[in-house]
Structures are given as structure tokens and as C-alpha cells.
Image (spheres, rainbow, N blue to C red):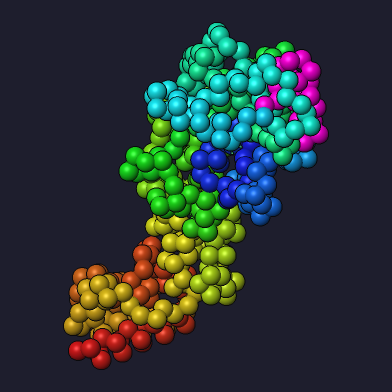
């Protein structure tokens, strides 16, 4: 069997993390089995669907690297095909016209609710020959008895009695097709072998299966993925923080970290946490998908992002970091090599924004000292230690790590104090208090001019506050 999966977003907003995870699972399953991944835009709700949103979805998928093999197919371009299928269902007596008025439908609904029954269409028009010339909807003639069995690849066997299902509207009175119709026609026409989607669609599946069967079409396999919850146990939504995939780009996340986070959100392979994309493709199976909903955990995402910042090629991080430095008004070509700064700082940041912030001091003088760091480092006598260090550093023939280290050591020896008495004020003088690596490396990268200039500024500050 050729494996074919699809992602079928409704373009009514940005690509959110739940949708991205569904897309990822579908993409991985197709890649894992050498199949095809199809993108279908379910834009039949014309009032809520926008081109902007289509663009946002495409942009999110591109950023995450979820490339599709076919599509995007737009449902609004396929109305002719949907009408053809409705015509076929009508011809075969598998669908019928219904002209029940809103009042009648509301009336039966109220009565059913009063009897504590599930509201459903009562089949009034099933055997009435409603003329095509009067306003009408088309309903699918759902079987009255028997069960529909969904052997869901995540949820296991789900059995729904046909008595629970009513005759669903498949075409509205304005001629537009409804969701369940377009989905079963498209899944058939696009030869989808595995429908992987959110479990909010599970209740539609028996209806879609009944319509596929009515036309003797193959029924795909289904895998309904549990929803994502916020940290409070409620369904993940905006109020839990960023839910838009592209927001994570802005917030300084790497796409591979977000993908890794999303694949682990509801899927596991032993207790492994880090998966390169190739590895996900090799290992992904639907039977590793959890049945229970998973909770979104920003701390874990930050941790993963940190691992990727730490372990990625510094040249790649440099490429991604440049725009965040740009946001701070920094041009990284004017200063030390960005890859060297990244190697020095990357263990100290969980996002690219943090990495940009703690790397700023390599490129420009800071405005003010971190109060806490300055309070600790700039004690009485620190100005003399800084002055002695300044003299040695300014006079160094060779601005190299070893020479810098030797100059600091010589200052320590000259003053007869502990190493920290010189190193601490020196570090804060140069960095302003930002996290930084070994002192000699820090000074080396900052450069001699900035080192001397900042020492002078620190001495000035210490003297003016004493
Ligand atoms: N268009 C639906 C949605 O965005 C998905 C339909 C499906 O996957 O069958 O939720």
C-alpha cells in the first residue's frame, strides 16, 4: 500500500502548535514509510477563511521544514466535484432533499431536549419527494441500524451505533457543501491511506465512513491524536501564552527544537528526549502516540531549545542570531567573530533572544552595570585593583588569551590579594554583569580598546560612589 497522509487546516488563523503537531505526525508517518504528504486547505467557510491565514500556515510549515509533496489543494476550487458526488448520492437514493423549515427543526429539537434525548433530525423528508425547485438542503441517508467500527490506530476500537447518527446535511440550501462531505470526498480523491488528525474530529469519523461505504469507496485508516492541554489542564489556548508557531520564531526558538518538542508532546520512544529530524523519521510510529492528552510545558521547550543552541553548528546559530542582534541595534560584523562569541556564550542562554542579550556587551558598551553584580564586585579597593590591571593590560604587546591571563595573574601577585579581588571587578567592569565565560576569553573577545575604556568607566563609577 502507498502511504499517503494529509494535513487539512482550515485557514481561519495562524498555524498553532496543535495544528503543527498534527501536521508533524502526518509528515513523519509519510516520510517514515516512503509515502506522500498532501496539504489541503479547507477553506469552504468563506467568511472565516483568509488568504493571510493560508500564508501564515504555509509560512509556519516552511519554517518547521514540513514540506508537502502535493498541494496545496483548495476546497473552494473543488465545488464542482462535490456537486458531482452529491448528484451521485441523490441518483443512487443515498441522499435526499429536505425542505424542513427552521421552525420545524427548532420544534423537534426542543421536544427532544425536553425528553432528554440527543437532538437529531427525525428523517421527516426521507421518503418525501421534495422538488429541486424549492429551497432545500441535501441530507445523507444514514443507515438506520448496525454499528460503525473505527479501528483507530491511536484510540483503539471505537464503536458507534447508527441509531446515534442522524441524516446529516451534506449540501446547504445555498448550494455549499458541508465539512463532512468535502472531507470524505477529498480523502478519497487524494487517495489518503491514513487520516491523522485531532481527536476533536473523532465524532465525524463514523459519518465519513458511512458515506465512503455508501459509494463503495475504500475507507482509510484513522489515527486521532489527543489534544494539547495548557499547564492548568484546560485545552491549550492563547491565554496560556504563545500558541502560534511563528511566535516561537520571534521568541528566539530554533525550528528543530520546536519540532523536537512537538514530537515528544504525545509521542514517545523509550525515554529518549532529543531527536534529530532524521531520527524522528526513522523511529516514528503511530503506536507510540499516547492516548491521553499531553500538557504543554514551556520549561521543557526552553530546555530543548538550549540543547539545540549548545549543540548546533555555531555558523548556523550565527545566521539565526544576527536578526535578534539587529533588533538590539547591533551589527555583529563590527566586533569579534560572531561564531567565537556564540561558542563562548551558548551554554548560558535558552533562547536566541537571551543569547543576543548576553552577547551584546562584546559589541557595544553597556549603559549601566547590573546593580547586584556591581554591588558585589565594586567594593573598597576595587578601583586600585582595576587600575593596576589596566596598566598591565594596556601595555600588553600581544592581545592574546594567554598574555591576558598572565597580566591578570601578575596584577594579583603584585597586589598580594586573592585572584577574585582582581578578577571579579574586572569581569563586571567589562561585561556590566552579564553572564560570561573565562575572564581571559571574555577580555580577548571584547578587545583591548573596549577593555581599557570600560575599566576607566568602572574606576570612575567606584570613585564617585565612595
Ligand atoms: N479542517 C479541519 C480542521 O482544521 C481538519 C479536518 C480533518 O483533518 O479532517 O480542524
Question: Considering depth in this image, is 52 or 120 the residue closer to the camera?
Answer: 120
Q: How many marks?
A: 0
Q: Quadrant of the N terminus?
A: top right
- Prevailing secondary structure class for the magenta stretch in the rendered image: helix
**Residue 228 location, quadrant:** top left
Q: Residue at x 67, y 26 (%)?
A: 98
Q: Residue at x 35, y 75 (%)?
A: 432
Q: Is residue 372 left or right of residue 96?
A: left
Q: Position of residue 75 (x, y in %)?
A: 72, 38
Q: Is residue 311 left or right of residue 29?
A: left
Can you say whether 197 is above or below 58 in the image?
A: above
Q: Residue at x 65, y 21 (%)?
A: 125
Q: Is residue 69 visible?
A: no
Question: Considering depth in this image, is 368 or 94 the residue closer to the camera?
Answer: 94
Q: Position of residue 332 (x, y in %)?
A: 56, 70
The verdict on residue 370 being magenta is no
Q: Residue at x 78, y 29 (%)?
A: 132
**Residue 171 location, quadrant:** top right
Q: Position of residue 213 (x, y in %)?
A: 67, 14
Q: Position of residue 103 (x, y in %)?
A: 56, 35
Can you say whether 288 is above or below 23 in the image?
A: above
User: What range is drawn magenta here?
Assistant: 79-98
**Residue 129 location, quadrant:** top right
Ligand 1 shown in quarter: top right
Can you say whether 315 is above or below 372 in the image?
A: above
Q: Is residue 221 left or right of residue 119?
A: right
Q: Is residue 145 visible?
A: yes
The verdict on residue 89 being magenta is yes
Q: Is residue 466 left or right of residue 196?
A: left
Can you say whether 371 is above or below 282 in the image?
A: below
Amino acid at each position: 500500500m502507498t502511504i499517503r497522509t494529509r494535513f487539512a487546516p482550515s485557514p481561519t488563523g495562524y498555524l498553532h502548535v496543535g495544528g503543527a503537531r498534527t501536521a508533524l505526525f502526518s509528515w513523519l508517518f509519510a516520510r517514515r514509510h516512503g509515502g506522500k504528504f498532501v496539504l489541503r486547505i479547507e477553506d469552504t467557510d468563506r467568511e472565516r477563511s483568509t488568504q493571510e491565514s493560508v500564508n501564515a500556515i504555509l509560512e509556519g510549515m516552511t519554517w518547521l521544514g514540513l514540506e508537502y509533496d502535493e498541494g496545496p489543494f483548495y476546497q473552494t476550487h473543488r465545488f464542482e466535484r462535490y456537486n458531482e458526488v452529491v448528484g451521485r448520492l441523490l441518483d443512487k437514493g443515498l441522499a435526499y432533499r429536505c425542505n424542513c423549515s427552521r421552525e420545524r427543526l427548532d420544534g423537534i429539537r426542543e421536544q427532544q431536549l425536553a425528553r432528554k434525548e440527543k437532538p437529531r433530525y427525525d428523517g421527516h423528508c426521507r421518503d418525501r419527494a421534495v422538488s429541486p425547485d424549492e429551497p432545500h438542503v441535501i441530507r445523507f441517508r444514514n443507515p438506520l441500524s448496525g454499528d460503525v467500527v473505527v479501528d483507530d490506530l491511536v484510540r483503539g476500537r471505537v464503536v458507534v451505533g447508527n441509531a446515534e447518527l442522524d441524516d446529516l446535511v451534506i449540501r446547504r440550501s445555498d448550494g455549499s457543501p458541508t465539512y463532512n462531505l468535502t472531507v470524505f470526498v477529498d480523502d478519497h480523491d487524494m487517495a489518503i491511506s491514513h487520516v491523522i488528525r485531532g481527536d476533536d474530529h473523532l465524532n465525524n469519523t463514523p459519518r465519513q465512513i458511512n458515506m465512503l461505504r455508501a459509494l463503495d469507496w475504500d475507507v482509510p485508516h484513522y489515527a486521532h491524536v489527543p489534544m494539547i492541554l495548557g499547564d492548568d489542564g484546560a485545552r491549550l489556548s492563547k491565554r496560556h501564552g504563545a500558541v502560534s508557531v511563528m511566535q516561537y520564531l520571534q521568541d528566539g526558538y530554533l525550528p528543530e527544537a520546536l519540532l523536537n518538542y512537538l514530537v515528544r508532546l504525545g509521542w514517545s520512544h523509550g525515554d529518549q528526549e532529543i531527536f534529530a529530524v532524521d531520527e524522528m523519521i526513522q523511529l516514528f510510529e503511530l503506536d507510540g502516540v499516547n492516548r491521553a492528552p499531553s500538557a504543554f510545558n514551556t520549561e521543557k521547550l526552553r530546555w530543548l531549545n538550549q540543547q539545540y543552541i549548545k549543540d548546533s553548528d555555531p555558523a548556523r546559530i550565527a545566521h539565526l542570531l544576527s536578526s535578534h542582534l539587529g533588533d538590539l541595534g547591533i551589527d555583529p560584523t563590527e566586533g569579534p567573530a560572531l561564531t567565537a562569541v556564540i561558542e563562548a556564550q551558548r551554554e548560558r542562554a535558552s533562547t536566541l533572544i537571551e543569547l543576543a542579550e548576553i552577547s551584546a556587551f562584546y559589541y557595544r558598551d553597556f549603559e549601566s552595570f547590573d546593580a547586584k553584580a556591581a554591588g558585589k564586585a565594586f567594593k573598597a579597593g576595587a578601583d586600585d585593583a582595576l587600575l593596576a590591571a589596566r596598566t598591565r593590560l594596556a601595555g600588553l604587546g600581544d592581545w592574546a588569551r594567554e598574555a591576558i591571563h598572565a597580566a591578570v595573574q601578575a596584577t594579583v601577585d603584585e597586589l598580594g590579594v586573592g585572584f577574585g579581588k582582581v578578577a571579579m571587578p574586572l569581569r563586571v567592569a567589562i561585561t556590566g554583569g552579564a553572564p560570561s565565560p573565562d575572564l581571559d576569553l571574555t577580555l580577548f573577545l571584547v578587545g583591548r580598546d573596549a577593555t581599557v575604556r570600560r575599566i576607566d568607566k568602572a574606576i570612575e563609577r567606584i570613585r564617585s560612589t565612595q
